[in-house]
Structure formats: C-alpha cells, structure tokens
Amino acid sequence: MNKRFTNILIVFAFCCLSLLLAACQASQTNPSDGSDPANGLSGAAGLNKKPTAVPPANVPDKVTEQAKALPTDVPAATSMPRPTGKIAFISNRDGDKKVYVVAADGENQIPLGDGTTQATTPRWSADGQTLAFVADNEQNTDIYLVRADGSNLTRLTDNPARDDAPAWSSNGQMLAFESYRDGNWEIYVVNVDGSGLTRITNDSAGDTNPAWSPDGQWLAFVSNRDGNANIYVIHPDGSGLTRLTQGDAPNSDPIWSPDSQNIAFRLFPSSGVSNICVIALASQGQTCYTKNLKTGVPAWSPNGQELAFRSSTGQSWEISVVDMRTGQVAHLPSEVSPTGDPVWAPDSLYLAYQVRYNNNMEIFYTDVVTKQVGLLTKDVTATYNGDPSWAQ
C-alpha cells in the first residue's frame, strides 16, 4: 500500500514538473511585452524594437510579406506642394453674377466689384495685384478694374457699345480689348488710368480676341479680313500687321507661349472638330497636336512646358495636356467632366476649371502630377461658380 502510494506521488510530481516547463517555454515563444521573436531579440533589445508596419486585419499575409521584401534604400515619397495663390471667379451666390476671389485652398472668399452686375471674364494682371473684368452697368457692357483686396473699383471704359475680352500688357500698365463702338469689332488699347485710348486695327471685317505677348512687343488677334478667320499679330502702336495662319480652315483663340516665341490656337478643319495647334512667330511653322477631337481654348503652363485644354470624342469632356517637349498628349483621369476651359496655377502644378456638379456649376482643381482632384467652391446659395483666373 505504501509502495503504491509512493508511485502515485512520483507520477504526480513528474506531471507538475512537465506542466511548469511547458509554461516557461510558452512565455518565451509568445511574449506579452511587444518583443518580436522573429528578429531574434529578447530582453531590453526586444522590448525597444518597434514594428515598422502594422498591416490592416483584412490584408493577406502575402501582401505583408511582399512589403517586407521591398529594398530598404527606397526613398520615402514626398508630398506635392499644396495649391497656392488666389483664384478670381464669377458667382451668383448673391443673386447676380459678380466677381469673387478665394485663396487656392478654398478659404477667405471675398466679393470684388460691388455694384457691378452680370460680370464675366476676370483676368489678373501679371503681378496678381489688379483684376480686370467685364460687367454690365446702366445697360452698358464695359471693362472694370479692381484691386485684389476689393479696393479701388474703377470703370475703365464707358461707351454704349460693348467692350469685351480684356488682355493685360506684361508690365500691367495697359490693356487691350475688343469693342463694337465703331460699328464693327476692332482692337483697342488703353492705359490703366483710362488715358491713351487708341484703336489699333481698322478694317471693315471683325477683329477680336486680343492676346498680348509676354514681352510686350505684339498683340495677337483673330480677323476675317481676308475672308476667313485667321490669326494675325500687330504691334501695340498699330504697326507691323502680319497674318500668321494660312489655309481655308477657320482659326481662333490665340494664346502666347511664356517666351513670346509661339502662339497656340484652335484650328477648325471641319464641323464639330477643332485641333490644338502651335505656330512659331519667326518661321510661321505650324504643328497640330490633336486630330478629330472637340477641343476648348488652350492654356499654356507658366513654365512653358505644357498646353492644357478640354477635349471630347463623344458626349463627355476631359482635361488633356500636351507635353511640349515630346509632343505627347495625356488625358487626366477624373470622375468629373469639365464644362469650362482650364487655367494654370502660377507654379504649373495645378489646373482649375468649372464643372457641372450636383446640378450646380462649381470650380474644381487637379494636381497634374498626382492626378488628384479637389473641389474649390461650394456654396449652397450659388448655382453658378465659374470662369476661374489664377494668380500668385
């Protein structure tokens, strides 16, 4: 009996010892202090080791292993600069279309041009300090100037005929515009203080769409004086009239390159089709970058490397960009379809444009590098926010 009892005690002691050893091994294999047995560290070294990434619970282990396998010398991604500067635009949030300005991050919206109605075509001076725009007042359509903070509202032109399409000189001292004051459309220039009004074209045909070269030497415009709409250039004093485009197809919307050496424009080879083309001022050599597309007015990036424009092959529109170094055309993917022409940010990294969105007209912007899209305007009292103009 004593021998049998002794054997039982021996077996019981052996079992207890086995359980104790197993528990110790478990505590070393699955530590609760955050150390990782896979890295072979324990004690103080293991306690201070922090995981480089914690995958979400629904990510397969294979993805995690692939991430761990990436080389350690890959540089960290850098975020793009946020949009900077200010954007002028037209909004009817107060019941009538007026000019507003907003910071590029969507903050600090303020009205400009109080007292004007039916405003259109906001255009910044080169230094971003003064805005020109077109508005109706007393049943006249004239050109106004206003400072970026809303001060010094000035009626620059005052004529019963329509004055439209203001274009700044690069030094900010003069504006060119189109006017019907002499019974047909002609190009005029005027100083910003209202003096020096000069008609620089004189033809029974229509002369419209003035665009001042950045070097201040030329004005490009559209005229049908030779029976077809073509691009012409002329000096601001009215001398040096030169026809640039040739052929039977109409042309419109001249836009200068930042170096004043080239002009982008639209060529209309057939109904419903408009090509984006560029002509050199010196050689008059012409290159077209699109074919069989509907396009909008092109916009040259401030760094001169890209042309942006609206394009469509069917019912919807998208933003397209030509790399002027390679001639390649890229289409920016987006879930929104632009209804207005794009304008560049001063840093050439962003484009702003108007979009029909939730039954309202709103202004969006796109990062041309990351292709990310953002909503700039959103006012429940406005059904129209459009015609953006971007300045530093």
Image (cartoon, rainbow, N blue to C red):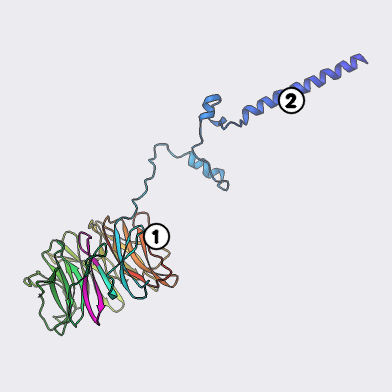
Kind of residue at badge 2: Leu
The residue identified by callout 2 is 19
Residue found at x 12% / y 67%: 218
Residue 150 is situated, as x and y percent measured from the top left of the image, at: 26, 65
**Distance Cα–Cα, label 2 vs label 1:** 62 Å
Residue found at x 56% / y 24%: 43
The residue identified by callout 1 is 374
Residue 326 position by quadrant: bottom left
Look at the image and tell me whether residue 245 can be seen.
no
* Viewer-side residue, 81 vs 94: 94
Report if residue 134 lies within the magenta region.
yes
Q: Provide the residue span drawn in magenta.
A: 123-144
- If the image is split into quadrants, where does the C terminus sit? bottom left
- If the image is split into quadrants, where does the N terminus sit? top right
Q: Within 10 Å of the Cα at label 2, are there few (<14), some (14-19), or many (20+) other Cα atoms? A: few
209 lies left or right of 67: left
Look at the image and tell me whether residue 284 can be seen.
yes
**SS label for mark 1:** strand
